């Protein structure tokens, strides 16, 4: 039982960056823009967050800087992908590649560091002890003592759900994604809505970056997001673009990862245990795919 | 309009091509004259995945290269491939650009090296941690298992101590590896044998991160192992290991560093580091390059000081001096052959 509680506790830590990026990515997904740049946005958030924290010693400034840097990437992505009507997948991949190189380059040129940047002057975010949660037995064990971004990811779930289904903005974004021509014909500012959707995602990716670099650890390592942005995309597709579904899948992916860490000391060849998270994603995507393919009348990536 | 435009493009392309060819041939000839006059020996090093900045393996090699540049006046170059698969490209390019010695730190280049080396008989190649046969290949082997044995012995002694840091006194220690491969398990087996040598009841928990650049995950694995009562954690996982050290620091237990002296990363929470003196090896190779004669296999163990424990600058005074004396004694026993440590890569 204790073991299970510990696994669930660590699941929250492991799923938070995925959940933040995924919930952010939902908006672009629903607006019909495939945002592959989630990974790069998270990585720049992590990098700028660490730099700002190192230079100013302020976590608040670090968070703001991380969000701003991700927003800038969001603008670049939107400009080429939406305004210039470039291929969004290629634009997104280009952004990921640029961020990977740029962060390594800046680290080397301005800070004389290669690969890892760790310094006592970097201020991180500490886990919170929330009084109300502390006293509730099982839920407290799982939900208390997490870093702020874990709670923000939970809050973002509700905000995203509310925004998508209970506000005009959400309705417009969904309309744009479902039938762009129709949205155009009723006079919706299609491009501006797409920009908004991408930028909302950028904000949450920036926070995801903060979670990876300033909460779990307080350091920057080249490519430290290690594909979490793509796992977030998998979570969005598995959850069929709904905030709750997406969050559930982010949580499941985090759970699979936390579980494989715990299972590693059992006498099964390690490789099989380490396959769990990836196998899980493939299986889930397959099942989701089987269910969604039914009743589809057209082909193309928008259906995915 | 279209035809003249095409013609113009063609003309420009041709011009560029001609210039490129000219540039290539001229650099080749100048490279040739350099080596024949023997003024400066040219040495290139290809890092393993993770590249420079790992404050560990690759950085250690770079230290040796810097020393070769400073003391031997060698012309040096470091290349950092993004991926193992780029090995072929870089080995070929460096050999073609007239380097006298091309060192690769990546074990994954084993196969391509075997094919490429015979094509460039004027270039000497060196690879670490594996034996590749060939007239112009030097293989450098470290006895990491010996260093790891010492680390395991020290860990098993210290883990029973309740007086330092936040240790629990239980006979449980752990290991975090980058991937489950013979190259990494060489460390693990030495570590386990060292621990069992001290106390056969010592339990060693093993975890793999499957990534050399994911400190978050490294920390998560570490925390999980600490919850299972492990309080000395040996990491062999590149930058992922930074997370392991961070985790050990958070819970105030001990991590053990690897490849270079990592004791300073978390003062008082890195028990010791198993140092692989890649710098010594690279420097030795550079000296050989200057002399122009190479050995086909160089083996560096505790005896040759190619592998050693760090000086424990921050932890020496925290732990029982008897432990350190015991480890010192074991070191002598390994050197004179009384204790034999298993090398899984040779099985």
Image: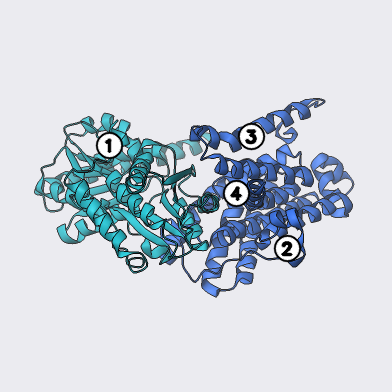
Q: Are marks 2 and 3 on the same chain?
A: yes
Give the image location of residue A237, x and y in percent: 71, 38
User: What distance separates the C-alpha of mark 4 from that of mark 2?
Assistant: 34 Å
Numbered badge on residue B130: 1
Q: Is residue B14 left or right of residue A253?
A: left
Residue at image mark 3: A280
* Front disc: 4 or 2: 2
Q: Residues within 10 Å of mark 2 (few under 14, many from 20)?
A: some
State which mark lies toward you, 2 or 3.
2
Badges 3 and 4, same chain: yes
Chain letter of the residue carrying label 4: A
- Percent from the top left, x then y, of residue A104? 46, 56
- The quarter in which the N terminus of chain B is drawn is top right
Q: Measuring 38% from the left and 60% from the top, which residue is drawn there?
A: B271
The chain coloured blue in the image: A
Q: Between marks 1 and 3, how big is the CA–CA gap? A: 36 Å
Mark with earlier residue (2, 3) = 2
Callout 1 crowding tier (Cα within 10 Å): few <14, some 14–19, many ≥20: many
Q: Residues within 10 Å of mark 4 (few under 14, many from 20)?
A: many
Question: Can you identify the residue that label 4 sits on?
Answer: A39
- What is the spatial separation of the Cα atoms under label 2 and label 3, in whole angstroms? 33 Å
> Which chain contains the residue that carries disc 2?
A
Q: Nearer the viewer, residue B198 or A79?
A: B198
Observer-nearest of A33 and B245: B245
């Amino acid at each position: 039982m204790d073991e299970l509680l510990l696994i669930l506790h660590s699941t929250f830590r492991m799923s938070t960056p995925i959940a933040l990026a995924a919930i952010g990515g939902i908006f672009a997904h629903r607006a019909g823009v495939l945002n592959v740049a989630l990974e790069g946005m998270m990585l720049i958030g992590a990098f700028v967050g660490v730099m700002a924290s190192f230079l100013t010693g302020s976590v608040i400034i670090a968070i703001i800087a991380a969000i701003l840097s991700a927003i800038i990437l969001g603008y670049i992505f939107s400009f080429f992908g939406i305004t210039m009507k470039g291929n969004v997948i290629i634009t997104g991949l280009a952004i990921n590649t640029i961020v990977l190189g740029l962060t390594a380059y800046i680290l080397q040129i301005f800070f004389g560091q290669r690969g890892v940047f760790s310094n006592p002057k970097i201020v991180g975010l500490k886990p919170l002890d929330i009084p109300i949660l502390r006293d509730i037995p099982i839920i407290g064990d799982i939900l208390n003592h997490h870093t702020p971004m874990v709670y923000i990811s939970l809050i973002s779930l509700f905000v995203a759900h509310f925004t998508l289904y209970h506000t005009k903005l959400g309705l417009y974004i969904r309309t744009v994604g479902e039938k762009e021509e129709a949205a155009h014909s009723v006079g919706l500012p299609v491009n501006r809505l797409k920009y908004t959707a991408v930028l909302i995602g950028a904000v949450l990716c920036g926070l995801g970056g903060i979670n990876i670099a300033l909460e779990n650890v307080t350091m920057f390592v080249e490519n430290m997001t290690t594909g979490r942005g793509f796992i977030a995309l998998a979570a969005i597709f598995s959850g069929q673009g709904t905030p709750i579904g997406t969050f559930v899948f982010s949580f499941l992916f985090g759970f699979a990862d936390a579980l494989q860490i715990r299972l590693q000391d059992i006498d099964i060849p390690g490789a099989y245990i380490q396959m769990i998270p990836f196998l899980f994603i493939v299986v889930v995507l397959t099942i989701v795919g089987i269910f969604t393919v039914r009743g589809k009348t057209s082909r193309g990536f928008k259906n995915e | 309009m279209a035809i003249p435009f095409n013609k113009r493009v063609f003309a420009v392309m041709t011009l560029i091509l001609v210039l490129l060819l000219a540039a290539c041939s001229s650099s080749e000839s100048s490279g040739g004259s350099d080596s024949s006059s023997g003024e400066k020996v040219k040495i290139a090093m290809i890092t393993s995945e993770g590249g420079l900045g790992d404050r560990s393996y690759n950085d250690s090699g770079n230290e040796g290269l810097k020393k070769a540049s400073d003391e031997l006046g060698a012309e040096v170059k470091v290349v950092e491939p993004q991926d193992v698969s780029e090995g072929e490209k870089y080995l070929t390019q460096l050999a073609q650009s007239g380097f006298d010695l091309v060192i690769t730190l990546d074990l994954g280049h084993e196969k391509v090296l075997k094919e490429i080396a015979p094509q460039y008989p004027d270039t000497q190649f060196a690879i670490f941690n594996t034996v590749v046969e060939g007239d112009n290949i030097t293989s450098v082997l470290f006895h990491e298992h010996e260093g790891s044995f010492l680390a395991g012995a020290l860990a098993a002694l210290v883990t029973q101590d309740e007086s330092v840091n936040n240790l629990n006194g239980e006979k449980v220690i752990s290991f975090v590896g980058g991937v489950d491969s013979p190259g990494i398990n060489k460390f693990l087996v030495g570590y386990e044998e060292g621990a069992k040598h001290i106390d056969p009841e010592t339990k060693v928990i093993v975890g793999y991160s499957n990534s050399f650049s994911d400190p978050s995950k490294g920390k998560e694995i570490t925390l999980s192992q600490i919850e299972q009562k492990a309080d000395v954690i040996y990491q062999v996982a590149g930058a992922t290991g930074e997370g392991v050290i961070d985790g050990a620091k958070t819970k105030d237990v001990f991590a053990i560093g690897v490849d270079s002296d990592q004791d300073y990363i978390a003062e008082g929470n890195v028990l010791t580091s198993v140092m692989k003196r890649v710098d010594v090896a690279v420097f030795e190779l550079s000296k050989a390059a200057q002399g122009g004669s190479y050995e086909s296999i160089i083996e560096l163990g505790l005896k040759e000081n190619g592998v050693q424990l760090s000086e424990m600058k921050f932890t020496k005074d925290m732990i029982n001096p008897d432990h350190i004396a015991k480890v010192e004694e074991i070191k002598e026993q390994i050197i004179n052959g009384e204790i034999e440590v298993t090398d899984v890569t040779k099985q």
